[in-house]
Image (spheres, coloured by chain):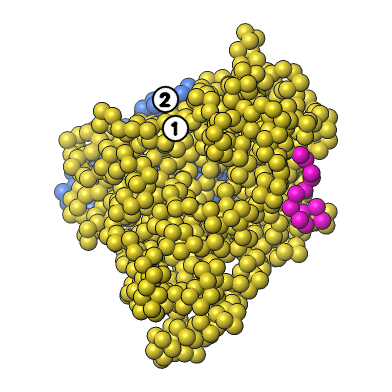
Chain colours: A yellow, B blue
């Protein structure tokens, strides 16, 4: 039986309820919501003057009404120490989503921690320290003192290279300008920590080096460009599933305005299916290429465009580099770059060559080129938006593949113009503002391997869970656990000792190969099982938070409730660590070093914002952002006039490309030479196993699965990680829908639940990424590119049944996801 | 229920009460009696409405209904196989709201796979799994109407298990 809340009535928002601006903190799109709170002993009424909407709520409200909210949009939370009613519902006046709620964001209220309704009881409320064989709750001062003493001792006995850092670099939940600045200031300014990695990849690096090296920032358009374009060219992305309201509120409008849709993806996605519904099948071209062959396809499209004279010659002459090679290939640059002519010497690929490599028809590749670039009958150029994400970012040969894709946009003049743009779609929102990270180096250290080799002594983890989101996860987890257990054993053995004795015991264990782990998170995560100190953070709306979305739209998402228990904003946890580091280092006699930890006298997240982002963007303040509401302002902010922040709708409208730092303002083309599988071990693994194990996302919990692992609505739908399979393959293996299976290869094993998906090709499966109960990363090999970008997407293995479906899945639907109209 | 393709229609409002006037009148009478109660109760009291007789139903042919009142359109189905919440001698008669709990678009029935589908944003719900959302944007599964069959084979609705789109109280 499907999960039902058995709610037959909700409290009505009174006319005088408090109202807050909320940007959904889960995904990159950043939909606008409004939060309403009011005292627990009051309620609105159905009469128009008794409710926030000013309408008669005793009547049924119409389709797409503003005056309705689902039970998932309601909760009771703490605000200034008191319980209040809370409703968080989509904002019809936000240009991003125009009142649409996603299956994720429209559950923000329900996914708030509440001691009254019992939601999200998994949230951490107090600092925890490993003592006497368990995690004991304690005060902030006690926990931070231990963190500072161990950290200070390790980095003064050795160096800052012994401090390993795993840290978010994004906006939205867990990130934002306040928190990226604070963590950046601590680790990159007060210290120069270089053994760092980001939440979803094993090094501290860009995911899109090549487009930046070409001069093109990866977020250069406005979402409205999808509405004004002739063609949407989507690669390795599934926006209906993930960036849902970007698709529904902008791409669909483009399709309804007559745009065509090209999808490059080995799998028929829900985006392909829905686009056929919205645009008509004749206006959708799905290039279902063999996995990992994107670059050859892009090179053939580019070649066809060039050979037919469909390039934008004026744009190329004015805005791109002329005269051969501009930058050479070297250790930090996996391809050379230069003029279009120069790049073509390497990129030139015939339709037939690409058809052979990619496994799609030559005429379809030609058709894609026509849809992108063949001028219209009246001679006008076609406009094309190019959008890409993990299919190529986590794909084969990241640098050259993305370079080959951006080549097409540059050759056709589709950057910096209405209806154009070549952009990654993104996962989290962005919110990066940190001191220079130049000391990290390029290529950056492969931190997972650094830890696996037994290096590093202290591991500070900020809102990262590599148990779920790293490659080679089986080995990583094994080693991380073994090393951290050495320290736990040492703490247990020193039980009853003074702080000094315990610290000495910890450091001795570290010197013997152990790892001291500090985990800052909102929940007790899986990697947190290895932690010795756990510090509870709070989330967006439990603090004020600024971030920008995929069209660089900056908003202040306002605090409307208290942090849960004694949890704190990350920025203020940073301040606490810094202050304790200063104190401990001074006590140790390192006065000069201690001085480096001054400058953290923040009492609110706004203090951290003013110390960081505001210094670089002096026009931007909380008050001004608050006044800009849920539509905010698109970065970069260029001024303040008539009481409003002035932003930038799209980048490069002047035809000058600057992301690479070249003074000539000329974009570069990438000499993207196809070389088959780039990462080590991929070709061998492909040859050795039957199934390609693709990892995919699900709209129901994309970007908030850490909360949804305790959400009844979600767990009812997917109690186990799904592994979508062609039904004929299931028959081969004796699998029924819902049966438990395991995926096995030389890298490890992971577990999931068989879900039939008739549209999947034979011998391929689509397993959900990042599931708490079955990490797909367990079976992904350690292969990365020259700049340590992981190739999560390419992994092969065998599948075997573990068990018949359990009673838990008896109520689960196993029908196809595609709408039937 | 008649129109499966509303994609091109843009934003629309469903027509209130069309084709369900008889049920609406019955429901209204019940609601009227309810309104006379002096003390508010902790939960909504649902009216009981006759929807149809078992003999009116053919396997896998949807019947338009409304419950708890004329402004809340629904569908009555004999699925042919026992299903969660199913009543009748075969345990296969179920009823659901057809207002999508995402944005209130009218769902259409796909007899091929026994799902209700939204033409607006492509959410879909499994009639054989208690209205579980197979894929979509709604943050709840589809409201299912509680049913009772009497000795004469009359099918009555007398409850709803989720909040119906467009109303903050299931009984207005």
A40 on left or right of B86: left
The picture quadrant where one finds residue A548 is top left
State which region is magenta: A673-684
Height in image: A794 above or below A301? Answer: below
Which chain's residue wears label 2?
B
| Residue found 40% across the figure and 27% down from its top | B14
Task: Pinpoint residue B107: horizontal percent, then vertical percent.
Answer: 49, 34
If you read the primary sequence from the N terminus, does the residue marked by circle 1 or circle 2 appear first?
2
| Towards the viewer: A258 or A544 | A544
| Towards the viewer: A747 or A37 | A747
| Residue found 75% across the figure and 62% down from its top | A745
Task: Pinpoint residue A435: horizontal percent, then vertical percent.
Answer: 44, 53
Q: Main secondary structure of the magenta part?
A: loop
User: Could you tell me if residue A157 is visible in this image?
Assistant: yes
The residue under label 1 is B105
| Residue found 36% across the figure and 51% down from its top | A612
Mark 2 element type: loop
Which chain's residue wears label 1?
B
Q: Going by the picture, which residue comes out furthest to the front?
A: A592
Q: Residues within 10 Å of mark 2 (few under 14, many from 20)?
A: some
A32 on left or right of A677: left
The numbered dot on residue B12 is 2
The picture quadrant where one finds residue A344 is top right
């Amino acid at each position: 039986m499907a999960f039902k809340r058995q709610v037959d009535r909700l409290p009505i928002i009174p006319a005088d309820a408090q109202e807050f601006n909320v940007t959904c903190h889960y995904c990159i799109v950043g939909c606008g919501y409004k939060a309403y709170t009011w005292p627990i002993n009051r309620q609105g009424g159905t009469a128009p003057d008794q409710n926030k909407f000013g309408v008669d709520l005793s009547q049924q409200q119409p389709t797409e009404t503003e005056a309705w909210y689902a039970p998932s949009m309601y909760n009771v939370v703490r605000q200034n120490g008191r319980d209040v009613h809370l409703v968080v519902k989509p904002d019809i006046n936000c240009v991003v989503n125009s009142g649409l709620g996603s299956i994720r964001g429209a559950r923000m209220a329900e996914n708030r921690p509440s001691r009254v309704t019992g939601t999200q009881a998994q949230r951490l409320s107090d600092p925890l320290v490993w003592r006497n064989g368990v995690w004991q709750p304690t005060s902030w001062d006690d926990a931070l003192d231990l963190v500072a003493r161990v950290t200070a001792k390790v980095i003064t006995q050795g160096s800052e290279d012994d401090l390993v850092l795993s840290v978010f670099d994004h906006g939205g939940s867990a990130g934002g300008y306040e928190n990226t600045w604070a963590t950046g200031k601590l680790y990159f300014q007060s210290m120069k920590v270089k053994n760092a990695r980001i939440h979803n990849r094993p090094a501290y690096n860009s995911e899109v080096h090549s487009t930046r090296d070409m001069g093109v920032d990866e977020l250069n358009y406005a979402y409205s460009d999808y509405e004004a374009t002739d063609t949407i060219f989507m690669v390795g992305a599934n926006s209906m599933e993930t960036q849902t309201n970007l698709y529904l509120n902008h791409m669909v409008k483009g399709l309804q305005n007559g745009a065509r849709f090209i999808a490059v993806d080995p799998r028929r996605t829900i985006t392909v299916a829905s686009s056929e519904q919205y645009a008509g099948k004749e206006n959708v071209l799905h290039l279902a290429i063999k996995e990992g062959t994107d670059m050859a396809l892009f090179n053939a499209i580019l070649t066809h465009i060039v050979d037919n004279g469909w390039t934008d010659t004026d744009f190329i002459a004015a805005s791109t580099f002329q005269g051969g090679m501009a930058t050479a290939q070297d250790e930090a640059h996996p391809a050379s770059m230069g003029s279009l002519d120069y790049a073509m010497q390497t990129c030139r690929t015939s339709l037939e060559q690409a058809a052979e490599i990619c496994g799609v028809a030559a005429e379809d590749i030609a058709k894609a080129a026509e849809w992108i670039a063949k001028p219209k009958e009246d001679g006008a150029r076609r406009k094309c938006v190019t959008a890409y994400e993990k299919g190529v970012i986590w794909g084969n040969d990241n640098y050259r593949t993305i370079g080959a894709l951006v080549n097409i946009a540059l050759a056709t003049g589709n950057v910096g113009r209405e209806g154009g743009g070549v952009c990654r779609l993104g996962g989290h929102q962005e919110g990066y503002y940190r001191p220079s990270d130049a000391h990290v180096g390029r290529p950056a250290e492969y931190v997972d391997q650094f830890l696996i080799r037994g290096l590093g002594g202290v591991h500070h983890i900020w809102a990262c869970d590599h148990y779920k989101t790293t490659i080679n996860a089986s080995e990583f987890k094994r080693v991380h656990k073994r090393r951290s257990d050495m320290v736990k054993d040492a703490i247990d053995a020193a039980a009853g000792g003074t702080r000094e004795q315990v610290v000495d015991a910890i450091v001795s264990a570290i010197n013997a190969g152990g790892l001291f782990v500090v985990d800052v998170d909102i929940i007790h995560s899986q990697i947190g099982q290895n932690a010795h100190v756990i510090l509870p953070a709070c989330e967006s709306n439990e603090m004020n938070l600024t971030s920008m979305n995929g069209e660089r739209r900056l908003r202040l998402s306002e605090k409307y409730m208290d942090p849960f228990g004694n949890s704190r904003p990350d920025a203020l946890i940073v301040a606490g660590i810094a202050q304790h580091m200063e104190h401990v280092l001074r006590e140790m006699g390192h006065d000069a070093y201690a001085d480096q930890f001054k400058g953290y006298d923040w009492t609110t997240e706004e203090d951290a914002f003013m110390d960081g982002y505001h210094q670089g963007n002096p026009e931007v303040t909380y008050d001004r952002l608050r006044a800009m509401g849920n539509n905010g302002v698109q970065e970069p902010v260029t001024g303040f006039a008539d009481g409003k922040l002035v932003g930038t709708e799209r980048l490069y409208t002047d035809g000058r490309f600057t992301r690479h730092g070249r003074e000539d303002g000329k974009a570069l083309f990438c000499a993207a030479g196809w070389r088959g599988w780039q990462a080590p071990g991929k070709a061998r693994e492909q040859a050795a196993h039957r199934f390609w194990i693709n990892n995919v996302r699900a709209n129901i919990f994309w970007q908030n699965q850490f909360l949804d692992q305790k959400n009844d609505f979600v767990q009812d739908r997917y109690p186990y990680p799904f592994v979508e399979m062609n039904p004929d393959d299931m028959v081969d293996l004796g699998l029924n829908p819902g049966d438990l299976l395991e995926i096995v290869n030389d890298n490890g094993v992971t577990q999931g639940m068989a879900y039939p998906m008739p549209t999947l090709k034979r011998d391929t499966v689509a397993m959900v990424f990042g599931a708490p109960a079955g990490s797909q990363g367990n079976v992904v090999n350690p292969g990365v590119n020259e700049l340590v970008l992981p190739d999560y997407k390419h992994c092969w293995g065998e599948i075997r049944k573990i068990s018949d479906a359990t009673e838990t899945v008896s109520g689960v639907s196993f029908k196809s996801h595609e709408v039937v109209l | 229920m008649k129109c499966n393709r509303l994609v091109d229609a843009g934003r629309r409002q469903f027509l209130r009460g069309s084709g369900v006037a008889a049920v609406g009148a019955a429901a209204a009478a019940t609601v009227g009696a309810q309104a006379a109660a002096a003390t508010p109760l902790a939960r909504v009291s649902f009216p009981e409405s006759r929807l149809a007789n078992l003999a009116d139903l053919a396997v896998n042919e949807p019947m338009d209904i409304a419950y708890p009142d004329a402004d809340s359109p629904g569908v009555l189905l004999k699925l042919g196989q026992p299903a969660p919440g199913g009543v009748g001698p075969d345990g296969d008669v179920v009823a659901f709201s057809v207002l999508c709990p995402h944005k209130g678009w009218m769902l259409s029935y796909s007899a091929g796979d026994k799902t209700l589908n939204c033409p607006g944003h492509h959410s879909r719900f499994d009639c054989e799994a208690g209205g579980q959302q197979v894929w979509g944007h709604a943050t709840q599964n589809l409201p299912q109407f509680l049913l009772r069959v009497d000795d004469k084979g009359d099918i009555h609705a007398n409850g709803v298990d989720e909040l119906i789109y467009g109303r903050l109280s299931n009984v207005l």
